[in-house]
C-alpha cells in the first residue's frame, strides 16, 4: 500500500464528492458516479461504504435533504424545493424530509430551524501503521460444491443462521465434499454471494454456502456454483475467532482495497477457518476476494 496510492485514492474520492455536489438537483445514477470515478459500480459502492460508514445512495439522499432544508430556510416554496430535488409530489417530499430530520417542511419555514448534513471531505489519517499480509493468486475456472441458504447480513459476532446451515449438513454430504475437493485451498469453505442491495447496512442478506472447490462437473448430493477464471487477493489472519476474521475483512475493504492497484469484481468471496485445538476460540483464517487490476 503506497503513500502515492493513498493520495490518489483520496483525491479521486473528493473529486467524486464534488461531482455529486454539482449534480444534487439532477438524476444521479450510482452507475454514473462509479463511471466518473473510473472504477466498477460494484467496487466503488463497497469502498465508499467501508470508508464512510454509509451507502452511496444514503449519502446522496442526506445531502439532497440537507440542501432542501437550506432552501426552505432561504424562503423557497415547498413545492419548488420538492421538485428541485427529484420528488414527484410535495407529500412524498414531506414524508422523506420528516423521516430524515424529524420536522415537516412547513416546520422549517415557521420555526426557522433545520437539520444539516455537511458535504464529505476525505483525508488521510494515519492510525497505528499496522501492515496487512496478502498475496495475489490466479486461478482457472472451477466449481464450488456445497449446501447453501439465504442468511441475514451480520458484520459482528457469530451468525446463528450460518451455524444452523453447518449443522444441517449430513454425513453423506460431508463425505462427498471431501471426495470432490481437488483445488487448493483443500479446506471446507464459507462462500458468500448474491447480496441484497441493502446488505452494507446489515439490511437483507446474502446467500451463504458451505462447501469446497473442485474441478469436477457434477455432484449427486450438493449444489453447484460455477466461478470463472480470475485473480484472488488472499488475506491470511490469525487470532481470536470470529473477531480477527471480521476485523481483517473490514480492513480489507476499508484500507487495503482503496489504496491498492486492484478493484473488486462481482463474484463470490470466500474464507476458511482452522480452529486451534490448543487455544479456545483461536483460529487461522484466510479471506479470498475476487479482483482485477485497475
Image (cartoon, helix red, strand yellow):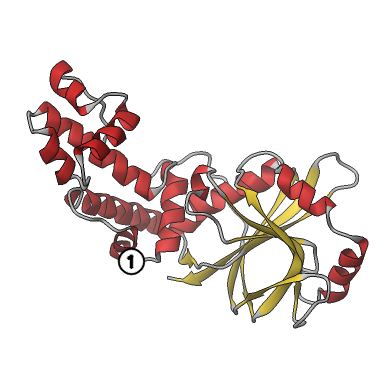
Q: Nearer the viewer, residue 269 or 133?
A: 269
Question: Looking at the image, which residue is at 61% across and 43% down?
Answer: 154
Classify 104 as above or below 154: above
Residue for point 41% across, 51% down: 48
Residue 105 horizontal/vertical position (percent)? 20, 28
Give how far across and how far down residue 168 sits, in percent: 83, 54
The image quadrant that residue 183 belongs to is bottom right
Q: Residue furthest left?
A: 75
Q: How many C-alpha atoms fall within 10 Å of the one at disc 1: few (<14), some, or many (≥20)?
A: few
All told, the count of numbered labels is 1
Q: Which structural element holds mark 1?
A: loop
Work out whether residue 202 can be spotted. Answer: yes
Q: Residue at x 30, y 54 (%)?
A: 11
Location of residue 81 (image quadrant): top left
The residue closer to the viewer here, 278 or 47, is 47
Residue at figure coordinates x 90%, y 47% from the top left = 277
Image quadrant containing the C terminus? bottom left
The residue nearer to you, when weighing 42 against 99, is 99
> Which residue bears the numbered disc 1?
38
Q: Is residue 122 visible?
A: no
Of 52 and 282, nearer the camera is 52
Residue 265 appears left or right of 268: left
Residue 150: where, in percent of width, then height? Answer: 65, 54
Q: Residue pushed farthest top?
A: 111
- Quadrant of residue 188 within the rendered picture: bottom right
List x then y, in percent, for residue 41: 40, 63
Amino acid at each position: 500500500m503506497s503513500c502515492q496510492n493513498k493520495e490518489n485514492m483520496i483525491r479521486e474520492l473528493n473529486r467524486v464528492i464534488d461531482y455529486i455536489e454539482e449534480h444534487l438537483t439532477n438524476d444521479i445514477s450510482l452507475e454514473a458516479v462509479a463511471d466518473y470515478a473510473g472504477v466498477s459500480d460494484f467496487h466503488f459502492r463497497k469502498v465508499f461504504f467501508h470508508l464512510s460508514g454509509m451507502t452511496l445512495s444514503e449519502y446522496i439522499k442526506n445531502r439532497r435533504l440537507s440542501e432542501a432544508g437550506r432552501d426552505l430556510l432561504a424562503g423557497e416554496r415547498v413545492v419548488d424545493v420538492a421538485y428541485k430535488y427529484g420528488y414527484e409530489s410535495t407529500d412524498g417530499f414531506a414524508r422523506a424530509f420528516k423521516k430524515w430530520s424529524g420536522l415537516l417542511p412547513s416546520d422549517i419555514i415557521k420555526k426557522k430551524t433545520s437539520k444539516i448534513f455537511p458535504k464529505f471531505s476525505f483525508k488521510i489519517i494515519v492510525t497505528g501503521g499496522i501492515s496487512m499480509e496478502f498475496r495475489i493468486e490466479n486461478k482457472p475456472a472451477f466449481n464450488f460444491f456445497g449446501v447453501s441458504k439465504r442468511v441475514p447480513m451480520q458484520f459482528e459476532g457469530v451468525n446463528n443462521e450460518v451455524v444452523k446451515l453447518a449443522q444441517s449438513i449430513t454425513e453423506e454430504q460431508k463425505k462427498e465434499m471431501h471426495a470432490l475437493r481437488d483445488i487448493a485451498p483443500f479446506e471446507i469453505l464459507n462462500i458468500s454471494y448474491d447480496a441484497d442491495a441493502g446488505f452494507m447496512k446489515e439490511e437483507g442478506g446474502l446467500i451463504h454456502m458451505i462447501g469446497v472447490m473442485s474441478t469436477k462437473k457434477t455432484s449427486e448430493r450438493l449444489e453447484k456454483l460455477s466461478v470463472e477464471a480470475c485473480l484472488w487477493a488472499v488475506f491470511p489472519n490469525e487470532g481470536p475467532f470470529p473477531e480477527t476474521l471480521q476485523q481483517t475483512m473490514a480492513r480489507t475493504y476499508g484500507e487495503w482495497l482503496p489504496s491498492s492497484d486492484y478493484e473488486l469484481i462481482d463474484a463470490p468471496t470466500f474464507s476458511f477457518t482452522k480452529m486451534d485445538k490448543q487455544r479456545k476460540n483461536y483460529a487461522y483464517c484466510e479471506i479470498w476476494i475476487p479482483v482485477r487490476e485497475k
